[in-house]
Amino acid sequence: MRVMVIVKATADSEAGVMPSTELLAAMGRYNEELVKAGIMLAGEGLKPSSQGKRVAFDGPNRRVIDGPFAETRELVAGFWLWEVKDMAEAVEWVKRCPNPMPGPSEIEIRPIFEMADFGEVATPEIIAQEEKLRQQLR
Amino acid sequence: MVAEHETHAAIEAVFRIERARLIGGLARLLRDMDRAEELAQDALAIALAEWPRSGVPENPGAWLMAAARRRAIDGIRRDRMRARKHAEIGRDLTEAEDRTAALEAALDDDLGDELLALIFTACHPLLSADARAALTLRVVGGLTTAEVARAFLVPEATMAQRIVRAKKAIAQAGLPFAVPRGAERAARLPSVLEVIYLIFNEGYAATAGDDLTRPALCQEAMHLGRILAGLLPEEPEVHGLLALMEIQASRLPARTGPDGAAITLPEQDRARWDRLLIRRGLAALARAEALGGADGPYALQAALAACHARAARAEETDWLRIAGLYDRLLATLPSPVVALNRAVAHGMAFGPEAALALLDPLAAEEALEGYAPLHAARGDALFRVGRAAEARAEFEEAAALSQNRQERTFLLRRAASCEQARSG
């Protein structure tokens, strides 16, 4: 299964504090382990939300909001995509990660939807059909 | 570490992460893959008994290895006592002493390449490709014997036999569980890559069974390929193979229709291709090329797959480039099937006359006798140059030779359309 492993932001990451040399080295070693274990598919670090933008949707309206955004602990500072057997394996790998932040921090693991989640019969054609039907019923 | 309650599921997840390396390390010490697997399983049992109380240790891999080694030493000591009791002093005893000494000396001797050594040993050319694939899935991939049996659609007892025989063959040959270097590595790497690609293809174009594809098996092969690429980052063909698998697997979601029938490449809905796998595959191909491996057989096949991956629509396919790649592939991997595909590619790039010129000599090729795709390719080229009667005969011949019902229907339909072209 594919999972997204989300490194949550902290006040430090939002302030643009760069990680120490030690942390960078430890992260490098950890990433190497992930590669050698064959589970790493992708991974990126994100710049602070002060450099981000949001687009708010309300019916036909689109409103652009400039960062930074307030709810720091809910923001994303970085992510990986992994291919693992199950959530238990993902949790064990996350436990081995060095603390990505100078202070207390959190990493969240979320399974990615896969074809099988839609059931055997629900091919995109069928999903599209159902979508059409739902619109007609509305 | 603070003691905490660890569930069995969590401990088993830790074990799964460590298992292959553990078996590799133990097999190297004992030169016995079967015993290594047993000891690894013993170490798991010990962990399941202790970790719920003590918590998972800081370095679980080293902990499991130490537990397994203690077990191994205990076993050898027991053997030695028994030997002494029965006064069977001699070869067995000396051997047992040597092994204990080796085990004790090796306690702190961690080379870090046990996993790679295990892969090379399980894929040793002295085993048949099927045996190599089964053993690799079992000891490296961590599949149960029942799962491996299902993968190859054979009864579990048959598969258990195959795996036992493979382990015995390795023990009898006295293989050292070492990573080959230099010229020997170059000679043995192809047999490792062959095994991984065989596993992939078993999933991608299932040769038997009811399903056209078995994605879980492709997943397993890609996992092995990624491990290998992580362990041998300087080997271009490892990246070439990974690129080939990832680009091919990117099409899995588009390859079967709602009724389970195959959808051919030009007809696939490209929006359903897995962009992450394409991106990874193209990056792996670039790596293989940067390492000087552009003309490796896997890299060339990956480059061919990449031509399709890069085309947003089937009409945008770069057939000139594909034809050129097939020229190079035929030089690297001379085979009648590659020659046939090359002829088809030349037909797409330069027109049906070019295809016919290359196809005609292939008709005499013994290996392609009774090969439906050859007749289908000739039929297509003949149809396009307006030789409808000959085209029809070729399509009918191809249909008669085809093993697949869906394909046969398709070929007969094409034969019928030749008739219309003639009368119309």
Image (cartoon, coloured by chain):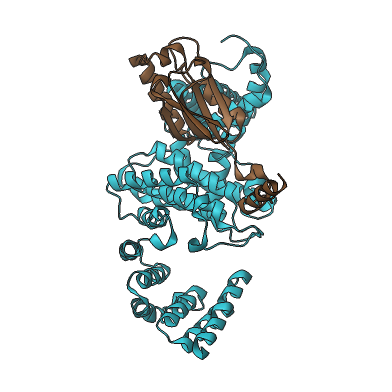
Question: Where's residue B401, x and y in %?
Answer: 56, 77
Question: Where's residue B177, x and y in %?
Answer: 45, 38
Q: Tell which of B69 and A18 is nearer to you.
A: A18
At x 56% / y 51%, what residue is drawn? B253
Q: Is residue B7 left or right of residue B126?
A: right
Task: Locate the N terminus of chain A by quadrant.
Answer: top right
Q: Is residue B395 left or right of residue B313?
A: right
Q: Is residue B142 left or right of residue A137?
A: left
Q: Tell which of B331 and B272 is nearer to you.
A: B272
The residue furthest bottom is B423
Q: Tell which of B324 and B52 is nearer to you.
A: B324
The residue furthest right is A137
The answer to which image quadrant residue B349 occupies is: bottom left
Q: Which chain is cyan?
A: B
Q: Which chain is brown?
A: A
Q: Relative to A52, does residue B371 appear above or below in the rendering?
A: below
Question: Where's residue B142, x and y in %?
Answer: 58, 38
